[in-house]
Amino acid sequence: MTGTAVTSKGTVLLGNGPTDREVVLEASSNLIDWQVLTSGRIDGGDEQITDPDAPRTTRFYRLVLANP
């Protein structure tokens, strides 16, 4: 993750990672219980994901390689 921005549509997460890798973006309110927000393949460029539920709660995020 390289940054975040709060908009009227939610929190926008910015990031990049290894080219052509499957990743899973997870969110947690307590750093113990994690839920999958989305998954996909990184194309080597900057990625942008919007979390529409973020303005209503405190969240932590992690980006996990799907098949390390």
Image (cartoon, rainbow, N blue to C red):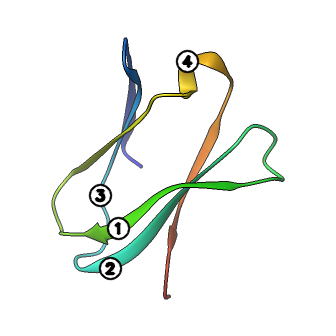
Q: Which residue is mark 1?
A: 40
List the single residue furthest toward the bottom. Answer: 68
Numbered disc in front, either 4 or 3? 4
Give how far across and how far down residue 34 sits, in percent.
Answer: 72, 55
Q: Amino acid at mark 3?
A: Asn
* Residue drawn at (32%, 66%) of the image: 17
Q: Which residue is mark 2?
A: 21
List the single residue furthest toward the top. Answer: 8
Give how far across and how far down residue 35 sits, in percent.
Answer: 67, 54
Along the line of sight, the residue nearer the viewer: 17 or 53 = 53
Q: Are marks 4 and 2 in contact (CB under 8 Å)?
A: no
SS label for mark 4: helix
- How many numbered discs? 4
Q: Which residue is mark 4?
A: 55
Question: Where is 13 relative to 40, above or below?
Answer: above
Could you tell me how far apart the alpha carbons at marks 3 and 1 are, in whole angstroms? 12 Å
Mark earlier in primary sequence (1, 2): 2
Q: Amino acid at mark 1?
A: Gly
- The image quarter containing residue 45 is bottom left
